Amino acid sequence: MVTIALTGGIGSGKTTIANRLAELGGVILDADVFAREAVAVGSPALRQIAARFGQQVLLADGSLDRPAIGALVFGDEEARRALNDIVHPEVRRLTGERLEEVLADDPAALVVHVIPLLVESTSNYDYEEIWVADAPARTREERLVEGRGMTREDAQARIASQASDDERRRIADVLIDTSAPLDETLDQVDAEWRRLAAAGLRAPETQTY
Ligand code: ATP
């Protein structure tokens, strides 16, 4: 099994790239999905969050009120750490479980772990490669406003709350240029995937003598 991380700022094209990699045979794991699953209604993590932050972080149906918890931890480092200490171990557990399933199913799987906040949230990376979807903030802002109907203020605030393009570039093994026309980006994705797949086939555990 070869695991790569795919990250990038909001609106940078992570989903577009992941969809292409799925078509090419990659197994896609999405950190956002695990993060939602970790705090599902009835989960131990959600109970701990309610115990720590109060019932006001729950909606009427018992699910997590994301804007409410977001507002509580915004600018409060201790609260943010407390929330992360509850959620992150559960996300790691769910991810590990899923990776074991994938490995059991196909020992030679090429796994793409989509982690939007890789730079912001992790200090040690355990991936064969880190791929970064890279487009200037200005381009991403336009796409969020034009393509997704976000207000300009909202788009700018979301972009500003994340790591900078330079911070992401520093950890990149592979930089996917998503400011190019889409077909050029997809060609680059295809080429990188072919390279990775060829290298993956030469990995010791799958080598045939
Ligand atoms: P989010 O962080 O909000 O989940 P994302 O990083 O997953 O966003 P996408 O959902 O893939 O980004 O959105 C990128 C948008 O930009 C899509 O509408 C896509 O069609 C468009 N786009 C235009 N040109 C490109 C390109 N060269 N590469 C990737 N996406 C592009």
Image (spheres, rainbow, N blue to C red):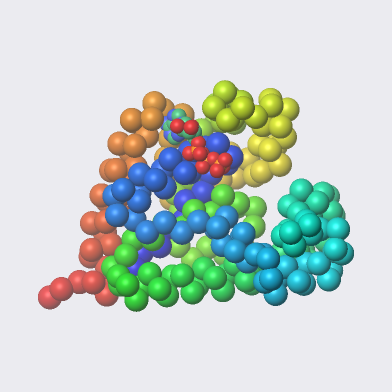
Residue 153: which quarter of the image? top right
Judging depth in this view, the residue of 95 and 196 nearest the camera is 95
Q: Where is residue 14 in the image (x, y as percent from the top left)?
A: 48, 43
Judging depth in this view, the residue of 101 and 129 nearest the camera is 101
Farthest-out residue, left: 209
Above or below: residue 6 compared with residue 177: below
Judging depth in this view, the residue of 190 and 91 nearest the camera is 91
Compared across the picture, whether 48 is left or right of 141 comes to right
Q: Which residue is drawn at 65% across and 64% down?
A: 40
Does residue 195 appear in the picture of this structure? Answer: yes
Judging depth in this view, the residue of 23 and 79 nearest the camera is 23
> In the rendered view of the protein, which quadrant contains the N terminus?
bottom left
> In the rendered view of the protein, which quadrant contains the C terminus?
bottom left
Q: Residue at x 42, y 75 (%)?
A: 100
Does residue 129 appear in the picture of this structure? Answer: no
Above or below: residue 54 compared with residue 186: below
Above or below: residue 16 compared with residue 138: below
Q: Where is residue 7 in the image (x, y as percent from the top left)?
A: 51, 49
Q: Where is residue 33 in the image (x, y as percent from the top left)?
A: 55, 58
Q: Which residue is drawn at 28% across and 43% down?
A: 191
Above or below: residue 30 compared with residue 15: below
Farthest-out residue, front: 61
Compared across the picture, whether 186 is left or right of 120 comes to left
Q: Position of residue 134 (x, y in %)?
A: 49, 37
Q: Residue at x 15, y 73 (%)?
A: 208
Disc tally is 0
